[in-house]
Image: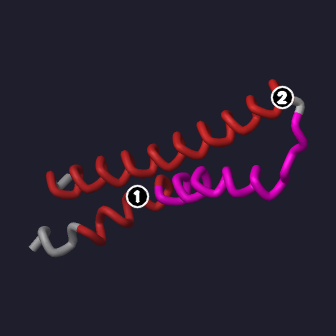
Amino acid sequence: MNPYKRAALLLIRLVASGFILFGLLDLGVYVLKHFLHKADWQVMRCLLSGVPVVIGLVILIKSPAIAARLTQDFDE
């Protein structure tokens, strides 16, 4: 495998993991707040907290294709 492609793949996977981690932490803090304070649930807030997780999963699944597209000029 091309070293540029490996580096791009590592960076893309790192960004995707950051999205997933941020989304899960945000959702976890929201759930913890509601368990401790017995507040009302807002469905829209829960859905919006899940958006970064979905974005991260899509990037993680598509990471080989994204890395190949980014490094196609270096293969020549």
Q: Position of residue 30 (x, y in %)?
A: 72, 38
Among numbered discs 2 and 1, the one appearing first in the sequence: 2
Disc 1 crowd rating (10 Å Cα; few below 14, some 14-19, many 20+) is some
Q: Main secondary structure of the magenta part?
A: helix
Which residue is rendered at x = 40% and y = 58% of the image? 63
- Closest to the observer: 18 or 67? 18
How many discs appear? 2
Q: Is residue 58 left or right of residue 71?
A: right
* Above or below, 11 relative to 67: above
Contact between marks 2 and 1 (CB within 8 A): the answer is: no
Q: Position of residue 19 (x, y in %)?
A: 50, 49
Which residue is rendered at x = 37% and y = 45% of the image? 14
Looking at the rendered structure, the kind of residue marked 2 is His
Looking at the rendered structure, the kind of residue marked 1 is Ser
- Closest to the observer: 76 or 69? 69
Which residue is rendered at x = 47% and y = 53% of the image? 60
* Above or below, 11 relative to 65: above
* Element on which disc 2 rests: helix
Q: Which residue is mark 2?
A: 37
Q: Position of residue 44 (x, y in %)?
A: 80, 58
Q: Is residue 29 left or right of residue 75?
A: right
Q: Is residue 27 left or right of residue 22?
A: right
Whether residue 29 appears in magenta in the rendering, the answer is: no
In the image, the segment drawn in magenta is 39-59
Quarter of the figure with residue 51: bottom right
Q: Residue furthest left?
A: 76
Please name the colour scheme applied to the rendered image: secondary structure
Q: Is residue 54 left or right of residue 17?
A: right
Q: Which mark is residue 63?
A: 1
Real-space Cα separation, disc 2 to disc 1, in angstroms: 40 Å
* Element on which disc 1 rests: helix
Which residue is rendered at x = 30% and y = 50% of the image? 11
